[in-house]
Image (cartoon, helix red, strand yellow):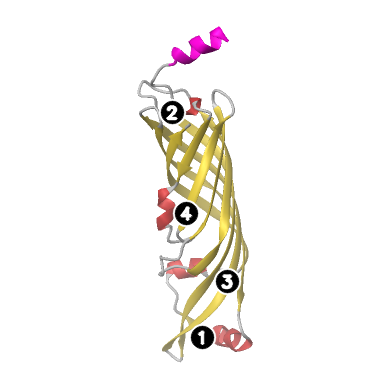
Amino acid sequence: MLFIQISVFAQDPKDHLLEHTLLLTLSPLALADIYDGASYRIGSELKMGPKIAFAIEGGGYLNYLKSTKNNPKGFLIKPEIKYYFGQNTKGDRKFTAVEYGFKDQQYDFKHPLLVDENPVERKYKMWRKVHTVTLKYGLSRNWGRRFNLQWYGGIGLRILNSDRELSEADRKILATATDDCSLQENLIKVVGSKVLPNFQLGLRFGFGL
C-alpha cells in the first residue's frame, strides 16, 4: 500500500491522459457532416495498458442540415482499439487505431429530375445500413491535467446496403426521366449493395477522470 501511495504522489504532472483510467469524449465535427448527416456523438476511452486503449463512440442523427438528408433517424456505434507511441517533451502522443463502424439510418430524399426537359421532384424514403473498417493515425494532446484534444485521419472500406420506398408510378417516372442530381445527392441516393473506400478526418475533445 505504501508503494502505491508513493507512486501516485510522484507522478509527473505532464503525464498523458492515457494514464487516467477513463477519458470521456465528444466529436464536434459530426455536427457538420454533410454526407452522412449531422449527428451527435459521445464516447469514452478506457486504458488497457501503458500503450493500449479501447474506445467506443455512439450517437444519433439531427435534422438541421436540410440540404442533405431530410428527417434522418437512426443510430451509429464505433468501437476501436488504439495503440499509443511514446510521448514527446510536451506530453503529445501519436497513435494508430483500428475502428469498426456501424450506422443504421432512415431518411427522406428529394430527387430532382427532368421530364421532357421540365424540372420535377420526387420524394421518397430511404433506408441505409453501413459497415466500415478504418485504419486511423492521429495525435493526442493535453491541456492541463484533465482536458485533451485528439485529431486524426483514416482510410478504409465502407460496405453499404441501401434501399428506397417507391410507388409504381414513381418507379416509372424515375426509369424514364433524366437525373438532375448534384454530386452530393448522387452519393446520398445510392441503392443496393456497394463496397466503397472510406475516408475520415476527425476531432475529439476529451475529459479525463
Residue beneath disc 3: 126
- Nearer the observer: mark 1 or 2; the answer is 2
Q: Find residue 183 and report its horizontal and vertical position in percent.
A: 44, 68
Q: Secondary structure at mark 4?
A: strand
Residue beneath disc 4: 40
Which is nearer the eye, 85 or 197? 85
Amino acid under disc 1:
Ala
State which quadrant residue 166 falls in. Answer: bottom right
CA separation, marks 4 and 2? 26 Å
State which quadrant residue 14 falls in. Answer: top left
Q: Residues within 10 Å of mark 2 (few under 14, many from 20)?
A: many
Q: Range of the magenta residues?
A: 1-11
Look at the numbered discs 4 and 1 and tell me whether their residues touch, using CB distance below 8 Å: no
Amino acid under disc 3:
Met
Q: Find residue 184 and report its horizontal and vertical position in percent.
A: 44, 66
Q: Residue at x 42, y 71 (%)?
A: 182
Is residue 9 covered in magenta?
yes
CA separation, marks 3 and 2? 41 Å
Look at the numbered discs 3 and 2 and tell me whether their residues touch, using CB distance below 8 Å: no
Amino acid under disc 2:
Arg
Residue beneath disc 2: 93
